[in-house]
Amino acid sequence: MTQTPTRLLIAASGTGGHLFPALAVAEQLKDYEIEWLGVPDRLEQTLVPKCYPLHTIPIEGFQTRLGFKTLQIFFRQIAAIFQVQQLLKQRKIDAVFSTGGYIAGPTILAARLQNIPVILHESNSIPGKVTTFLGPFCNTVALGFPETAKYLKRSKTLWLSTPVRSQFLAPQPLDLDIQSDVPLIVVVGGSQGAVALNRIVRQCAAAWLAAGAYIVHLTGENDPEANILKHPHYISLPFYENMAGLLQRATLAVSRSGSGTLTELAVTKTPSILIPYPFAAEDHQFYNAKVFADADAAYLYRQDELSSELLEKKVLELLASPQKLDFMATQSASLAYIDSAERLANLIRNLP
């Protein structure tokens, strides 16, 4: 008799930091029937439906001050628990996997009410509120950073790193006009708050270009000055899909420090200068970056402490020291498992 495939609900919503690791794990579970839970009008509406059935619930996180809006959000969260519970029953879900965020809250509680096992992945060094409060209700909280375990003593934790897309696991060709024998600086501003970082980088660019480097500057889509600098060795793009190929080719990255970006830097062994987004919730980007700085894989600067003169000088120093860059690359590689997606998939397979 043919065994019915295990039915898995993946709850991941909002940003690439939540979605890409979940998609990487899903790729490893081809023997599972996977359905997806998200939120209307978020990134999952673009990425998920071509691969998996997508269900949505209208919820949002507690980001506002106490008041009527907070009560509205609270009651929507309560209603969402019962909506998810009905979905779990109707779709006969056997297990749940979530990468956190506010969609994880009602999903974890609904799963426990149905006695369905849950794996939660926390990618940041400082765990979010959902992970802190609901981690004990999960079978295992998988961690992107080993240091996170000290904040989750009531939960069963396991460091498995953060999964990356499969493209990062094999060499990728680069379709940009960059010579093969020159240093390449990759600047990753991220989707939020890139304007200030972009401005500092453009002030440094002339010195880096004069030193013989190429620059690929990913500015994000909200920088009104994105196209003001022109040079044949300076490539400005709002985003670039082939991040695997770009980071594999990079000599040095100047970057924000979201957990997904840091994992990509580690997997591609890319030395970096990290400038955390200063308004990230609970300053989590700073604490993410500190793990890399403490391991000598990166230099870390607060944005309000960083001048163009300091950044310009530090990049030139590193470009002039291949031995230092090689050491940083080795240290960076030690901070992630290349097979994180496979390890997480096996953790899900071994659920009771």
Image (cartoon, helix red, strand yellow):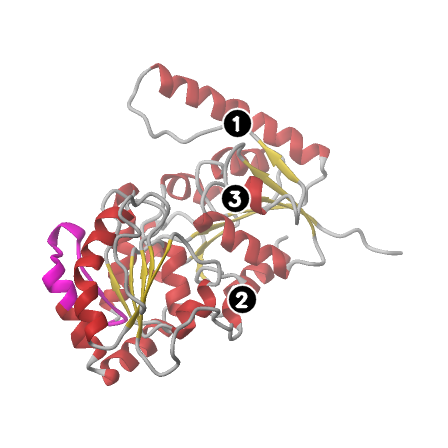
Marks 1 and 3 sit apart, C-alpha to C-alpha, by 14 Å
Q: Which residue is mark 2?
A: 167
Label 1: how many Cα within 10 Å (few below 14, some 14–19, many 20+): some
Q: Secondary structure at mark 1?
A: loop
Which of the marked residues, 2 or 3, is nearer the chain's N terminus?
3
In the displayed orientation, state which residue is furthest to the top. 68
Q: Which residues are magenta?
A: 296-312
Q: Which residue is mark 3?
A: 12
Kindly identify which numbered label has been placed on residue 144.
none
Picture residue at 50% right of the left edge, 45% below the top: 138
Q: Which residue is mark 1?
A: 58
Picture residue at 72% right of the left edge, 39% below the top: 92
Viewer-side residue, 166 vs 172: 172
Quarter of the rendering containing residue 200: bottom left
- Residue type highlighted by circle 2: Gln
Viewer-side residue, 109 vs 333: 333
Q: Are marks 1 and 3 in contact (CB under 8 Å)?
A: no
Quarter of the rendering containing residue 318: bottom left
Viewer-side residue, 248 vs 352: 248
Marks 2 and 3 sit apart, C-alpha to C-alpha, by 20 Å
- Residue type highlighted by circle 3: Ala
Which of the marked residues, 1 or 2, is nearer the chain's N terminus?
1
Question: Was residue 310 drawn as part of the magenta stretch in this picture?
Answer: yes
- Residue type highlighted by circle 1: Pro
